[in-house]
């Protein structure tokens, strides 16, 4: 007896299950930055890893893997492009989106005071979110990380290979990420793009365990003194309990 293949999008997946369905980009309007998702694709969950595969064009296969570690605020993502054709393929403007900040949302009071930091070629620049004028676009070549930092939360996007970081303000939204203008995949070859994304508390004693970037947290004498005093306070409280 043949097994029926579900055609609807599942609410949940079990480890080892494979589902296939077809959607258009309009069905996924929220921050869908990669147009290859308009092609039929399949999803498979194995343990704490989700793998999405698609064939957006003849001879091109795309596999995106998202790896989560229990107890961690970091997600690692790897996208592999495989070219089975006889000619090289060139992908243009491949984008890894960090976040879209809605300045009009209920959480705006926690966002408006935030900053976007970029490490481009070893030089770190700070960009206040609310000071970006409508239509503004900033780009930074050879960026090793870009992050959104506020008093409460921290989001750090770190590509395995440096790329072009960007910050864009459009209306009431600000988005940022990493862009690769051109990715060439040789005949019968493959290329991969990997990045890690930390999305968690901005508290130094929590975030620094997963984000080894001192320039994000500051290195001045007053910053170090503040951490020392905070650490002493926490140690005293833990003894009292």
Image (spheres, rainbow, N blue to C red):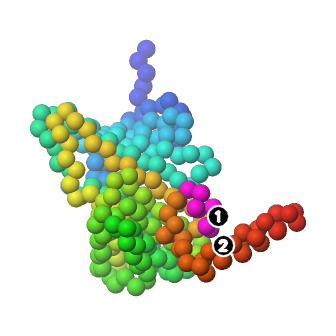
Which residue shows up at 45% across the image and 53% down it? 196
**Image mark for residue 205:** 1
Image coords of residue 16 (percent x, y): 50, 30
Q: Residues within 10 Å of mark 1 (few under 14, many from 20)?
A: few
46 vs 240, left or right, is left
Which residue shows up at 66% across the image and 77% down it? 226
Q: Which residue is mark 2?
A: 227
Q: Residues within 10 Å of mark 2 (few under 14, many from 20)?
A: some
Instruction: Tell me if residue 70 is in the magenta stretch.
Output: no
| Residue interval drawn in magenta | 203-211
In the rendered image, which quarter contains the N terminus? top left
Say if 154 sits above or below 71 in the image: below
Which residue shows up at 77% across the image and 72% down it? 233
Residue lying at the far top of the rendered structure: 1
Image coords of residue 146 (percent x, y): 41, 66
Image coords of residue 112 (percent x, y): 49, 80
Q: Nearer the viewer, mark 1 or mark 2?
A: 2
Secondary structure type for disc 1: helix
**Image mark for residue 114:** none
**Nearest to the observer: residue 18 or residue 209:** 209
- Picture quadrant of residue 208: bottom right
Q: Are marks 1 and 2 in contact (CB under 8 Å)?
A: yes
Between discs 1 and 2, the one toward the N terminus: 1
């Amino acid at each position: 007896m043949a097994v029926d293949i579900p055609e609807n999008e599942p609410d949940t997946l079990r480890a080892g299950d494979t589902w296939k369905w077809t959607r258009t980009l309009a069905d996924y309007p929220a921050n869908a930055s990669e147009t290859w998702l308009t092609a039929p694709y399949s999803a498979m969950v194995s343990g704490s890893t989700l793998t999405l595969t698609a064939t957006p064009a003849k001879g091109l296969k795309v596999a995106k893997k998202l790896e989560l570690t229990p107890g961690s605020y970091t997600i690692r993502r790897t996208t592999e492009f495989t070219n089975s054709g006889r000619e090289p393929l060139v992908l243009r403007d491949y984008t890894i989106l960090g976040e879209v900040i809605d300045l009009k949302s209920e959480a705006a009071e926690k966002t408006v005071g935030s900053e976007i930091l970029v490490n481009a070629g070893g030089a770190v620049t700070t960009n206040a979110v609310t000071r970006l004028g409508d239509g503004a676009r900033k780009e930074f070549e050879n960026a090793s990380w870009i992050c959104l930092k506020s008093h409460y939360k921290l989001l750090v996007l770190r590509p395995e290979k440096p790329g072009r970081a960007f910050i864009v303000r459009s209306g009431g939204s600000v988005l940022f990420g990493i862009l690769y203008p051109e990715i060439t995949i040789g005949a019968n070859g493959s290329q991969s793009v990997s990045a890690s994304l930390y999305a968690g508390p901005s508290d130094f004693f929590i975030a620094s365990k997963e984000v080894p970037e001192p320039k994000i947290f500051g290195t001045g004498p007053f910053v170090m003194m503040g951490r020392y005093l905070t650490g002493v306070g926490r140690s005293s409280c833990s003894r009292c309990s």
